[in-house]
Image: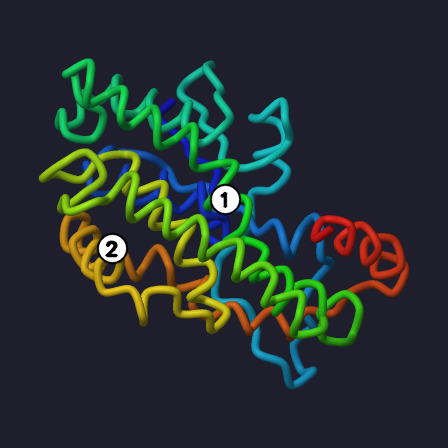
Amino acid sequence: MGLELYLDLLSQPCRSIYIFARSNNIPFEFKHVELFKDSVLGKKPAAGSGAEQPRAGPSNSEGAGKVSLLKKVPALKDGDFTLAECTAILLYLSRKYNTPDHWYPSDIQKRARVDEYLSWHHANIRANAPKTMWIKVLIPLFTGQPLPSEKLQEVMEGLSTSLKQFEERFLQDKAFIIGNEISLADLVAIVELMQPVGVGCDIFEDRPRLREWRRRVEDAVGKELFFQAHEMILNIKELSNIQIDPQLKEQLAPVLMKMLK
């Protein structure tokens, strides 16, 4: 049995793994998981309802649940070996397939810089960027009404603080986070920062240094692959066609609201 990757490309960690594997020509079977369709949000309107139908093929949510003990994506299956968590999967792939050194350098200090960013990322960029999608798309989908603009402003202020730190502490005047070549740190960062872009919050527009860094990351992995991986998030508004079970709405709406407090 070959390598299987269970991924939903609406997920930032899944996109980083997908881009990494494709850009390094790692052979794998893409097990497409549609979390919003199959597990959390319910289902899209049936054919004939007038709503746009999903473009993706069959989903593998049940299979992902069996592969990952945590019952979430991303998940990896390599023969009898299974693995969860984005960073663990990225490092496993880089070691097994001996990917170019710049991704996770053998130089101990450069590697430490990658580790430093990955540690910082979760409590800063990842703590703020995904909330834009919840505020502008998912919570209105569940509650039937938009959130006050002040809530988005609050999240954007927190994200702006994180982006300032990102530019000054990590990017500085370098082409990439650890120097002249792309690393796992850049990949993990860029997929997270595309989440606000997908819902109309262009965080790159007034930040020329950040915008040039994004361009270099796109070039490094290949623009075609980059936009293929981000096609779903850049068309996130299609989720408005999903029909939510009323009981599920009642159960999850307050939970989602608590996530933003």
* Residue at disc 1, secondary structure: helix
The reply, left or right, for residue 253 in relation to residue 86 is right
| Residue 170 locus on image (x, y percent) | 28, 39
| Residue 204 locus on image (x, y percent) | 32, 65
Quadrant in the rendering for residue 241: bottom right
Q: Nearer the viewer, mark 1 or mark 2?
A: 1
Residue holding disc 2: 225
Is 101 or 124 nearer to us in this picture?
124
Depicted 57 relative to depicted 3: above or below: below
Of marks 1 and 2, which one's residue comes earlier in the chain?
1
Per the rendering, the mark at residue 238 is none
Quadrant in the rendering for residue 99: top left
Residue type for callout 1: Arg
Depicted 52 relative to depicted 140: above or below: below
Residue at 70%, 53% (x, y): give it. Answer: 260
Q: How crowded is mark 1: few (under 14 residues within 10 Å), some or many (20 or more)?
A: some
Is 199 or 83 nearer to us in this picture?
199
Depicted 196 relative to depicted 65: above or below: below
Q: How crowded is mark 2: few (under 14 residues within 10 Å), some or many (20 or more)?
A: some
Residue holding disc 1: 126
| Residue 257 locus on image (x, y percent) | 77, 56
The reply, left or right, for residue 56 in relation to residue 226 is right
Point out the residue furthest to the left here.
180
Numbered circles on residues, count: 2
Residue at 39%, 69% (x, y): give it. Answer: 202
Residue type for callout 2: Leu
Figure colour scheme: rainbow
| Residue 21 locus on image (x, y percent) | 28, 37
Residue at 49%, 57% (x, y): give it. Answer: 57
Residue at 33%, 50% (x, y): give it. Answer: 190
- What's the CA distance linking mark 1 and mark 2? 22 Å
Classify the position of the N terminus by image quarter: top left
